[in-house]
Structure formats: C-alpha cells, structure tokens
Image (tube, rainbow, N blue to C red):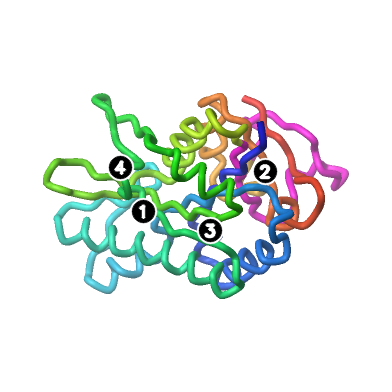
C-alpha cells in the first residue's frame, strides 16, 4: 500500500508566524508529486492568548489546557477552529487543494468507554487523500449527547487517525524537528537513519514525550522537516524505534 504521512503540528511550530507560509509554499512546490499527507493540530498558542485576553491563565496537562468553565471550554473550541481555518487559508492562498476538518465532523473522533480516543468513518478522509487533497484535522471531540465539544491532545488524534487509516494506507507519523533539520543528527553532524525513542531530546523535537507515546502505539515515527518531507523524490528523515 501507499505510504501516508500523518504530520503532527506541534505548538512550537504553530506559534511561528513564518511556519505556515513555509508549510504552504512547500506543499505548493511539491504539487501532486508530493507524498499523501494529512495535517493534525491542536490549539497551539492561539488559545492561550485568547484565554489570557479574557483574564484566564489555566495550566496545560497532557498538551491541553485545564479549563474549568463552559465559557473557557467554548473559547478553547473557538481557538482550535480558528487555527484550522488559518492553516487551510495559508494552503489555499498557495493554491494547494485543502479541506479543513474539525474532529467532530461526521463523528470522526469519539471516545470509548475507558476514555481512549478513536477515529471512525474515515472512508471519506481516505477518498480526499486519494484525490491529492490535503486534509487539515483539528483535535476536537464531542463528549456528550448535549453536543459538548472539547480539545484532546493532538498526539492522541494523530495516533487514532493513523491507526484508523491503516486499512487504506501505510501510515507514517511525522514529527517536525526543533531546529528545522531533516532528522536527528549525531555528534559528527550526520543524519541518523534510526534512533531509539529514549535518545530523542528537546534538541531534536519540541516534545520528546510525543515520540514515546507514538512508538508505544507501534506506529512508524519519522523525525524530519518540511524540506525532508516535501522537497525531494523521496522523504528523508530519521526513523524512531521504541
């Protein structure tokens, strides 16, 4: 089956004003010759600024903010949706075929009885990918019959999507490097082909705990950058083993 690159967009990169422009330009330059990719994101720093503007200063646990009221939850949801729209707008401006998807759309994400995040009804997402469309997926899930929506850790959304799409693709999770280099580099400044998850540090990726969570889920994990993902005939980077 064809490889599918599930790209985890972390807070570090989403907080960089130039990153989205670079992301869109790389996808535009790659065109239909680029590999199938799906982008997954959470709230980024935008939600923190939104809450701070309202006088709220919550902590983060597991990558999401500890909101205490319905108003705070709604502000988080709004910020996540706006991040999705910003990413889609940047890609669309570069004439990249793109579809913004909220995790609540068509029941894409749901939580099972023990709270684990699952992805379902992914056939329409697969169809978009096979049409060379770039789906941009937010980490939102509906948690009650009353339509209450909350943010979940983006790494969990990545894991759930990758596992659900295994029927149609061979998913590879891409984690973007801290220093904008195509992989993990050793002491001799040469790119490592493979490394152990425990060897990946903040010098390599913004949140090494994400690497460990993904490898524990038995998913192929690739540390790379936009150039390594989209600028050559083959995707380059460093694969991470559990």
According to the picture, the residue beneath numbered tag 2 turns out to be 223
Quadrant of the rendered structure where residue 46 is? bottom left
Residue 169 at x, y percent in the picture: 59, 34
**Distance between mark 4 and mark 1 Cα atoms:** 10 Å
Indicate whether residue 106 is drawn in magenta: no
Q: Residue at x 52, y 39 (%)?
A: 210
**Distance between mark 2 and mark 1 Cα atoms:** 25 Å
State the SS at label 2.
strand
| Stretch in magenta | 172-200
For the image shown, how many numbered marks are present on the structure?
4
Q: Residue at x 56, y 47 (%)?
A: 129
Residue 167 at x, y percent in the picture: 53, 28
Query: Counting residues from the N terminus, which is met first, the one under dot 2 or under dot 1?
Result: 1
Residue 164 appears left or right of 139: right
Query: Counting residues from the N terminus, which is met first, the one under dot 4 or under dot 1?
Result: 1
Q: Can you say whether 49 is above or below 174 in the image?
A: below
Relative depth, front residue between 142 and 2: 2
According to the picture, the residue beneath numbered tag 1 turns out to be 102
Query: Counting residues from the N terminus, which is met first, the one under dot 1 or under dot 3?
Result: 3
Residue 138 at x, y percent in the picture: 40, 52
Q: Residue at x 60, y 45 (%)?
A: 175
Query: In the rendering, which numbered label is found on residue 174?
Result: none
Quadrant of the rendered structure where residue 31 is? bottom right
Quadrant of the rendered structure where residue 93 is? bottom right
State the SS at label 4.
helix
According to the picture, the residue beneath numbered tag 4 turns out to be 107
Camera-nearest label, 3 or 4: 4
The crowd level at tag 4 (other Cα within 10 Å; few <14, some 14-19, many 20+) is some
According to the picture, the residue beneath numbered tag 3 turns out to be 12
Residue 215 appears left or right of 52: right
| Residue lying farthest to the left in this orientation | 146
Query: Counting residues from the N terminus, which is met first, the one under dot 2 or under dot 3?
Result: 3
């Amino acid at each position: 089956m064809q490889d599918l690159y599930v790209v985890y967009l972390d807070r570090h990169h989403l907080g960089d004003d130039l990153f989205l422009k670079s992301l869109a330009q790389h996808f535009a330059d790659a065109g239909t010759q680029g590999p199938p990719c799906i982008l997954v994101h959470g709230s980024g720093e935008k939600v923190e600024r939104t809450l701070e503007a309202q006088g709220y200063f919550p902590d983060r646990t597991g990558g999401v903010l500890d909101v205490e009221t319905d108003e705070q939850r709604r502000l988080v949801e709004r910020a996540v949706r706006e991040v999705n729209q910003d990413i889609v707008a940047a890609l669309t401006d570069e004439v990249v075929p793109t579809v913004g998807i909220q995790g609540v759309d068509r029941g894409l994400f749901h939580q099972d009885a023990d709270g684990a995040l699952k992805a379902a009804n992914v056939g329409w997402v697969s169809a978009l990918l096979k049409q060379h469309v770039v789906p941009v997926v937010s980490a939102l899930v509906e948690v009650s019959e009353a339509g209450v929506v909350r943010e979940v850790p983006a790494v969990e959304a990545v894991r759930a999507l990758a596992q659900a799409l295994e029927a149609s693709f061979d998913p590879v999770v891409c984690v973007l490097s801290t220093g904008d280099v195509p992989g993990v580099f050793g002491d001799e400044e040469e790119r490592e082909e493979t490394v152990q998850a425990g060897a990946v540090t903040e010098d390599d990726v913004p949140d090494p705990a994400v690497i460990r969570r993904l490898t524990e889920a038995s998913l192929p994990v690739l540390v790379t950058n936009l150039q390594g993902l989209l600028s050559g005939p083959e995707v380059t980077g460093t694969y991470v083993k559990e």
